[in-house]
Amino acid sequence: MKRRKIGIISGFALLLVLIVIGVSWYGYHHFGTLSTKQISANINSELIHTRQKQQAPLTKTYRQKLNSGHYTPDNMYVKLNPYKTSPLSALVAFKTKQASQVSIAVQGKSDRTTIKTTYSGYKTKHKLSILGLYPDYNNTVTLTIKAKNGQVTHKTLHIKTAKLPRALAKVKINVKTANKKKMAIGNDKLTFFVRTTKQPFGVDADGNIRWYSTNYSQHVFKELKNGHLLYLAKKNNQAEIYNELLETDFTGRIYKEYHFSNKTKSSNDTSGKGETTIVHHDTIELPNRDLLLTVSDGGGKYIEDTMVQISHKTGKVNKVIDLKKILPVKMWRQYDSTKRSDGKIDWFHQNSIYYDKSDDSLVISGRHQDLVMKLDYQTNQIKWLFSGKKKADWPRKYRSKILKTKGDTTYPGGQHAAILLPTASANHKNLILFNNNIAITNGPETTSKQYSEGVQYQLNEKDKTIKQTWAYGKTLGKQNFSPIIGSARYLNTNNRLLCFGFLKSGNKSRIIEVDKTTNQPVFDVELTNLPNKGYVYRSERFSLYPQNHNNQTYE
């Protein structure tokens, strides 16, 4: 009996010890993290309709003009800046007696700067966007109306635009190289400058501004699958917090407004003054049209290490990915590579997301770990890790995920904008990124801060190997070193668009389109006289009419 009692006591003692060990283990790995429910509550996202309601009377007026029957090819209704935020756009409405197809051409000032497009289908009611007007100029716009019976009519409009706003007009745009025949500009593409604040804008091959929004934007400026734009904005330009994502078009019409609480706001300015943001670096559209955002969890200590999926139907959070629960605890608990005066810990600093539809996974970039990695989107399991961190420094369970380098392959340092290219095969995928080349935690120390570059790699996800296949920027040296921000974009099989965004302490941005075959620039433009934080975070090459020619930007 006594022996049995001792056995029971021993069993309870062992169970207690196991519970204590379990609680301790869980506490060590999860202390400092929040529940999915709490993070969702902190984000507190919703769809609102403030701007849509404000625009409703305008949309109604334009519909009435179109349906009135008063406007014909000889007497078109023309409205410049139809939604009051896109001064270099216009709306044209008219009816034709016969079903007709319409082509538009905004005449350029030099070779290959005419913006032209053809609207698909034959219709009798025509409501058209005129995009790519020059500022402070009497633009010539030609409309070619082709009826189904083959009859063709040409009409010419003259649209006078206003001067650029003072702050934008002060930006100096110096085109150093423009080989227009080799540039990937098509008939209707501009080079867009996505800034850390102030107006986003697009230029043609001559460096002339042909589109801008009066709404200030920060970091997020994307084309959606339906041809609309998605960009991060503030309630108004005087507000201090970027907490609204707008789905809009190039004329400024708003289709959706996502609003976020300011509880999870963050900023690189640790003084607590100036602008802050909710979506700190990136947003992508998922195949089901939901949005995936880079955010902070709202816990107050750890920042810029969380992603949330937002329903495009409700605006609510329906998925949370907390990287603290995926990567080794030591990475965020003992992080000391960078310090903030406000005490917050920016251990990962996620600055990009890419969705790989081939295997339902995410490729993400973490600047402060000098790390690019791939996650299974359903399970959050790591598929691979690309970093200069020594294999022995990773906990054992992560080591099988590490990509092995082949040949002369550069590890990234403080990198941005990691995406996979459409040129994949059964066994190989191609990764491109902007390597700032600044060693934060695991980047190469020997070359750190000597240059920045766009780099392309070929990786074999089956055997976990990676090999560098192309790079551009090293020969430009220290004067082209960008310690923060930047991007690398795929334009076609030949051309890459690189953004060296933070030169001369943020007083200059340089964007270069490179012919990958010759490794020579075909477009090289410098922006100077930039306002505070008005430098170029990313550069994109967007079509003004993506739906007309199925020529949306790849990303």
Image (cartoon, helix red, strand yellow):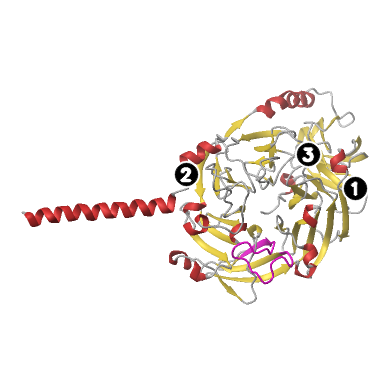
Callouts 1 and 2 close, C-beta under 8 Å: no
- In the picture, measured across the screen, residue 38 lies left or right of residue 50, that is left
At label 3, the amino acid type is: Ser
Q: Position of residue 462 (x, y in %)?
A: 51, 68
* The magenta segment: 430-453
Q: Amino acid at mark 2?
A: Leu
Magenta span includes 183: no
Classified by dominant secondary structure, the portion drawn in magenta counts as loop
Tell me where residue 276 appears, x and y as whole percent. Answer: 66, 41
Q: Residue furthest bottom?
A: 407
Farthest left residue in view: 1
Q: Is residue 529 above or below residue 515?
A: above
Query: Which is more toward the observer, 152 or 345?
Result: 345
Q: Quadrant of residue 497?
A: bottom right
Front-lying residue, 428 or 508: 508
Asked which secondary structure carries label 3, the reply is loop
Q: Residue 213: give its label.
A: 3
* Between 387 and 496, the one nearer to me in the picture: 387
Which mark is in front, 1 or 2?
Answer: 2
